Image (cartoon, rainbow, N blue to C red):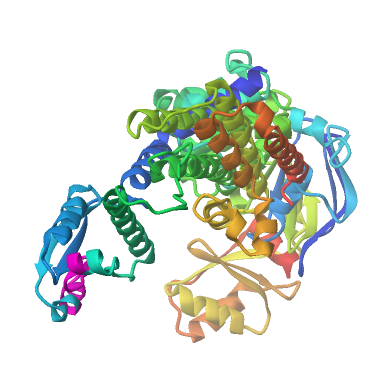
Amino acid sequence: MSIEVKHISKSFKDVNALKDISFSVKEGELFGIIGPDGAGKTTLFRILTTLLIADSGSASVSNFDVVNNYKDIRKSVGYMPGKFSLYQDLTVAENLEFFATIFGTTIEENYELIKDIYVQIEPFKNRKAGDLSGGMKQKLALSCALIHKPEVLFLDEPTTGVDPVSRKEFWEMLKRLQQKGITILVSTPYMDEAALCDRIALIQDGEILEIESPEAIVLKYPKKIYDVGASEMYLLIESLKEYTHSYSVYPFGEFVHYSDKRESFDPKELQDFLESKGLKEITIAATKATIEDTFMELAK
Amino acid sequence: MKRFIGFVKKEFYHIFRDKRSLFILFGMPIAQIMLFGFAITNEINNVDIAILDKSQDATTEEIINKISASNYFSIQQYLKNESEIEPIFQKGKVKAVLVFENDFSKKLTTESNATVQIIADATDPNTANTISNFTSSILQKYQQEINQELKIPYRIIPETRMVYNQELKSVFMFVPGVMTIILMLVSAMMTSISVTKEKEMGTMEILLVSPLKPYLVIIGKVVPYILLSVINAVVIILMSIFIFKMPVQGSFLLLGLESILFIISSLALGILISTISETQQTAMMISLMGLMLPVILLSGFIFPVASMPMPLQVISNVIPAKWFIIIIKGIMLKGVGLAFVWKETLILLGMTVFFMALSVKKYKIRLE
């Protein structure tokens, strides 16, 4: 096991940030920690990167204990904090060179590993890191976290505040890194990114709700889900919530994800109800549950 | 070693790219020395005075000539009667008025007693005191001159000689003090700010999750500022020698080594401050309030330690600057060697080691 977490709990003053968390990540796995802001993701990352000590429980990274063998872990992992944490007054090249030096390596030595990412920011290598765009900053931060060829890579919300195109590119890069045998633990509040992981852990209020592969996790959704559409979104949501048999109602893009309490659900009956509320252009079609639906269901 | 050099290189990038701090770093010493050297001074020079001479005879004329011939006073106005004294003070035109009584010469020869009244504006007590002292000494000198022929038995004439600073130039007193303050501020404030900056920017988080050892981070932070502070010390000493003609009697080597010792002790204090503050602002406030004020008030730079109340005297002992000022005053003005300042040096060394050890111990290897 590359990462092993056993019954970790951590609290700050009166906040229980993590409550009895356990999971493990296999070698070479791309493991996602999915949860909203304040779920405890960053605290978990800081415990695993030896920055914080848990109140109880134990954890190991590459078979090193996070408390007793913290020095070994610091040599062998790459860490990219949630907040952009490079030297803003240093240029792209200087930042990379600095991190290579303090890890006792050179850019040339591990250039192969970062090549795909670095070529994209190389044209700006003499620009100060503080002047880069959000996506560029993340690429540089990832390059710096990778320059010493880490065994395990910790990425805390790497795509927060990054445009959709850069986000997509970023995940493609993670996939390529995974193929090079690097274990990756990544956290994100975006449910659509969760589908790109091998396995995900859904986390809320410091508790893990479920650990599964993205494909398996949606099967956990207990009901059939329907895309319901109508001319007036707001009235539609209100009406669906009013409907006596409704089990869950969540807006999802241009539709509303609806599920019914009953086993035998007749779309015609719902259509009539909605028409009686004065809604027009009503469409009802069966659809698959998403990770978001599952998360909402589990988080209830 | 390569890691260490890489770290120091990064520190220099930070320093040289932040133009504003760079300006403070090198502009402050020059500005301070100039301020203390020229503007803030205890000496009096061309102080404006007025004279009310009620007798207007040969003797008073001679005394007035002597007073105006000195560089200390410049006579602005001759008053006609006492009622003019109050208004002239109120207008702030003069700092003092000399009043010669009626029939000054006659009284001096017949009664061998004549009075000169010195009225000084004591809103600024220091200047008022100095004016009255200087005037008295001019009068005394004149008295001795006219008494030369007379035989007065058993006279004690005190002959004062000011050693080490014969002209009583206040800049000689300020230079060691200003040098101390600047070295202390630059070293302690700049390092504490640069460490807390890493905390604020989040880069400390990455530095911690790296194989870089804590003591290397500390030394790496300190080394650039040792170099910069040494440059500052050299600039201050050169300025005091060439601009203020201050003689450095003792050995430059000893002065340099003692300065480096003091710089290191201040840097250690700076690191210590950074371990207890989370933001650059707190670090700056602690450095300014916690270091600069005690240094100015308690180190003996402006107010002599010996005339402080007992509790303050005790407190002043824990201020490294106090010992450093004693040392450099000794070396610069008295020209003493290590044999005379070894005790102070040892105290300073002990403090440096203590601060160093404490800051390495307090340096956090994790986030909390």
In the rendered image, residue B153, in percent from the top left (x then y), is placed at 44, 53
Q: What residue is shown at x 29% (from left), y 58% (from top)?
A: B135
Q: What residue is shown at x 45% (from left), y 79% (from top)?
A: A279
Q: From the viewer's perspective, is residue B289 above or below residue A121?
A: below
A190 in magenta: no
Q: What residue is shown at x 58% (from left), y 47% (from top)?
A: B196
B93 in magenta: yes
In the rendered image, residue B116, in percent from the top left (x then y), is placed at 26, 67
What residue span does the magenta drawing correspond to? Answer: B86-106
Q: What residue is shown at x 58% (from left), y 78% (from top)?
A: A240
Q: Quadrant of residue A125?
A: top left
- Would residue B315 appear left or right of A207 to someone viewing this image? left
- Would residue B305 appear left or right of A229 to someone viewing this image? right
Q: In the image shown, does B233 or A182 lie closer to the viewer?
A: B233
Q: In the image shown, does A162 or A67 lie closer to the viewer?
A: A67
Q: Is residue B186 visible?
A: yes
Q: In the image shown, does A214 or B149 lie closer to the viewer?
A: B149
Q: Is residue A95 visible?
A: no
In the rendered image, residue B3, in percent from the top left (x then y), is placed at 65, 22
Q: From the viewer's perspective, is residue B232 above or below residue B129?
A: above
Q: In the image shown, does A189 or B273 lie closer to the viewer?
A: B273
